[in-house]
Amino acid sequence: MPRFDLAILARRQRNVRRSSIVLRDIVPPAVLATDLYRAVYKPVVEAWISALPRIEAEYARTIGEMTTDSAADVKAEIDTAAGEVNRLVLMLTPALREWALRVEQWQRGKWRGAVLSATGVDLQTMLGPEDVRASLETTIQWNAALVADVSDQVRQRISAAVFDGLTNRTPAREVAKTIREKTGMGRDRSVRIASDQLTKLTSALADERRREAGIDTWKWRSSHKLHYRPEHAARDGKDYTDATAPQDLPGRLPYCGCRSQAVVAFD
Ligand SMILES: [Zn+2]
């Protein structure tokens, strides 16, 4: 919902002759994605890595003895590790919150700067994190679920490799190599998720700040990323309103790096 009308404020500030002003593109820096990965996802991946020697040792012992119920001991070792990681996941919410607030503060500063340089209007006293609290909460909850899912997927892959190994009497060394690879996949997935989550949060914040300022129109900015969507690239530079926008808004589909640029229209 609009809280103020930037076009009116801009007119009061300056004698605007143009029919519209495009606010500058706000590009989130990769370091903010790295921060999310380091603060939240990396500790979970590392907790699994630190549990691997115990799982590997139990596997080696089991494959050496191969008594009837010995598979239960490896399973117990994996369950213990999963329990420890799950407790860690539950403690990560404050770190997630801190990250989300940091991104919000960064985005708000950039938005204020873009508005100031384009219109001469300083929004500093008019903007606060409370305006976008719902988006921040959604991001926090969603990432808590995502990091739990990353951990669960790592657990499933380790379990599958271990029980496959027991069935096929695979040497311990080979199984150890496999479960390290599976854990590495969890790390790679986490890096991609962190990057995507930064885009999603900054896209949501950009939309909210624009609507709050009473701005309907925005310009599509294609990511020009390596694996960009051709239909998104075709929208580059085109103007949309919330009414005319396609369903897949910039930055919302998985790994979409597109952005929207607010356009202040004077009528
Ligand atoms: Zn895109």
Image (cartoon, rainbow, N blue to C red):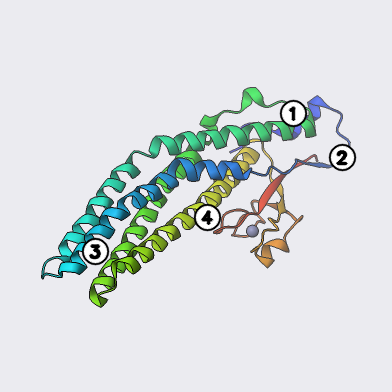
Q: Do residues under tags 2 and 3 come within 8 Å of each other at their CB atoms? A: no
Residue 52: name its quadrant. bottom left
The residue lying at 62 percent from left, 36 percent from top is: 107
Residue 248 percent location from the top left of the image: 59, 59
Tag 2 residue: 18
Give the CA separation, mark 2 to mark 3.
74 Å
Sequence-wise, the earlier of marks 2 and 3 is 2
Along the horizontal axis of the image, is 11 left or right of 248? right
Q: Quadrant of the C terminus?
A: top right
Q: Tell me the kind of residue under disc 4.
A: Arg
| Neighbour tally class for label 3: few under 14, some 14-19, many 20 plus, Cα within 10 Å | many
Tag 4 residue: 192
Residue 234's place in the image compared with 21, above or below, is: below
Give the CA separation, mark 3 to mark 1.
71 Å
Give the CA separation, mark 2 to mark 1.
15 Å
Mark nearest the camera among 2 and 3 is 3
Give the CA separation, mark 3 to mark 4.
33 Å
Q: Nearer the viewer, residue 124 or 239?
A: 124
Give residue 83's mark. none
Q: Nearer the viewer, residue 182 or 137?
A: 182
